[in-house]
Image: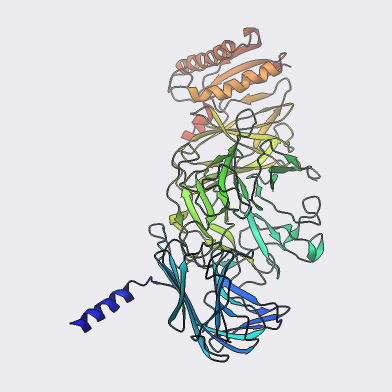
Amino acid sequence: MKLLALLLVVSVAVQAQPPVLVREDFSTNTYGWWTGTGENYTMRIERGKYIITTTQKDKGRYVAISPYIDSNKDFTIEASFVQKSGSDNNGYGLMWGDNANGKYHDFTIASTGYFRILTPEKGEKLNQWIASEKVAALGEENKLKIEQRKGRLYFYINTHLVTDIDALPFYGMRTGFITHTDMVLEIDNFIIRHEVKINLPINLEKGLVKENLGPMVNSIYDDLGPIITADGRTIYFGRENAPENLGGKADGEDIYMTTSTDGLTWSKAKNMGAPINTTETNNLAAVSADNNLLMFCRNDGFQVRKRTKSGWSEPEYLNVRFANEAKTMEANLAADGKAILFTAKLPQNLFYKKSDENLEKDIYITVLDGAGKWSAPTNLGKQINTAGDELSPFLAADGRTLYFATNGRPGYGSYDIFMSKRTGESWTEWTEPVNLGPEINTNSFDAYYTLSAAADYAIMVSDRNSIGASDLVRIKLPQAVKPDPVVLVLGRTLNAKTQQPVSANIYFEDLAQRKEVGEARSDPSTGTYRVTLAKGKNYGIRAEAKGFLSVNENFELASVIEYQEVTKNLLLVPIEVGESIMLNNIFFEQGRPVLKSQSYPELDRLVSIMKDNPTIKIELSGHTDNVGNKEALLTLSENRVKAVKDYLIAKGITKERVTGKGYGGAMPVVPNTTDANRQRNRRVEFKIVKK
């Protein structure tokens, strides 16, 4: 019975071990361990061993991977080591909790028969060599194991417990191996046990493959931080320490760009040159949906450059300022141009600590109001931000789907990419973030994820199977983590009389809410513009330029179920006598001369035009289709003209400045052969009769 009881206890103990998170026997390089040669070291995989060779007595080396480990839960880290040669008195072993900035813990042994727990923390058993007969000699195998159990750390050499201490804090997620002096060290059977419950999307697609964008885009240097434009035809990105950088190899980063006509074949990446780049480090944070504005992060705010006929304007600060306490930050400009999401360490951080070493960032938002002022930063709240570090926020074109990276949630590596959707109109109401899964995220660092408006493929960075260091890759976006579909409206802003391009500001509004919901600019040289419109609304869209009247268009997107592209030129009519303009966003009740409220924004703009140009006089003309009695249609058109005239007069325009006439169905602009054509013929226009 005693033997049976002992067996049961042993069985329970084995079952209680955390599951295997990492198992590496170095038969292949499954986890992407660094291999190569440096100034005083070489690292290679050979004969099923990871071999570290260091040649400098007072300078060792460490190497790490970044699986997610919750420092508050149980885990074990173990590996086998054989020191083949070299100095035997200054240690090698396991390291964990590393933040890549010099803060970590290590459990090391010296082949002369000592062990040490080296850490920035202080304690009785820490940072001192302790003799142990359990250490095998030079040339023999030593198995090291660290076990955290119920808030306490246990250290084993060759299966023997040699010491235990209270659990140590994690500074980061990097875990691996370290040497402190010159030696040849062989490592095998690296195992991490830890239970990680990752919140994955339902029905997440499998079989996704990251496709390298190829040598026309990528280089042997670090290519990183991609930003793809809304139309999917341009990618901006950074390249570190390349000879082609304006400051040469000493230049930390320059901004490059590449273009495509089909999203598959990309042009040779080109340095954007001055003034965008300088001989110092340059980081691009965001690009507007129209591709006519570049935004850059500064530690106290944001600067923008606008496209001009000759290039780019001088940088100008946006009127939102703050004091970021972290060394870095990232930002994203919403597709509607009305919001900026960014990361920073501010006193409003949910887990704020006033410490130079605590650099964890939260995601914030600032919103542009109707008066052109940016709001004070608002923290996105506990549904998004964690006690860890959040970075690289990206708001999809639908204005509701947020992608971001964090090390504060269970994942596959040190930082994983997550997705959440906004559930209301507030910027603090979000769904529980979901991990994008193991085919997008890896056991290393994953962030900087960007989508076009089509959201068919994501562009991101990977160092796996790369041309050089890190490369730009694309991966098909799983349906489970796609944003809501949008419509990309693109075209040119043109002089209606000459068909020449006009540099214009473009505004789009929710007609039902009578609210402006976005803005853009057209290219000053070509008049090209792009705007993205989220589904489910009826939009008015117009272009404005000095000396012109805009012809407003509307888009009904209530029934959109998939991504669409619509080409629509926006016409601007010069303010000249005899010019006629169609009021496309005026709506009446069916068969009646009663204005719907969606018409008010269009009419209010006409009021503003007449007030800004107090000598203008206009003539209104009302038109119908040809369905019905001619006399009834004529009367309806006259009454609708009267309804518009009465609205203008009620808003302060004198009646002498507005005349009008109804024409019924006598003057169609297109044949009344389809419902769409008949809708075009049901219209109200105005003509300038005096300037």
Image height of 94 relative to 671, above or below = below
| In the foreground, 176 or 588 | 176
x and y percentages locating residue 346 in the rendered image: 60, 44
From the viewer's perspective, tell me whether residue 461 is left or right of residue 633.
Answer: right
| In the foreground, 501 or 10 | 10
x and y percentages locating residue 447 in the rendered image: 57, 59
From the viewer's perspective, tell me whether residue 4 is left or right of residue 465.
Answer: left
| In the foreground, 610 or 376 | 376
Q: Quadrant of the C terminus?
A: top right
Q: Which quadrant of the view contains residue 621?
A: top right
Q: Which quadrant of the view contains residue 686?
A: top right
x and y percentages locating residue 211 in the rendered image: 57, 67
Q: Residue at x 72, y 31 (%)?
A: 497
Instruction: Report if residue 677 is visible in the image.
Output: yes
Image height of 157 relative to 301, above or below = below
Render colour scheme: rainbow
Q: Residue at x 66, y 16 (%)?
A: 618
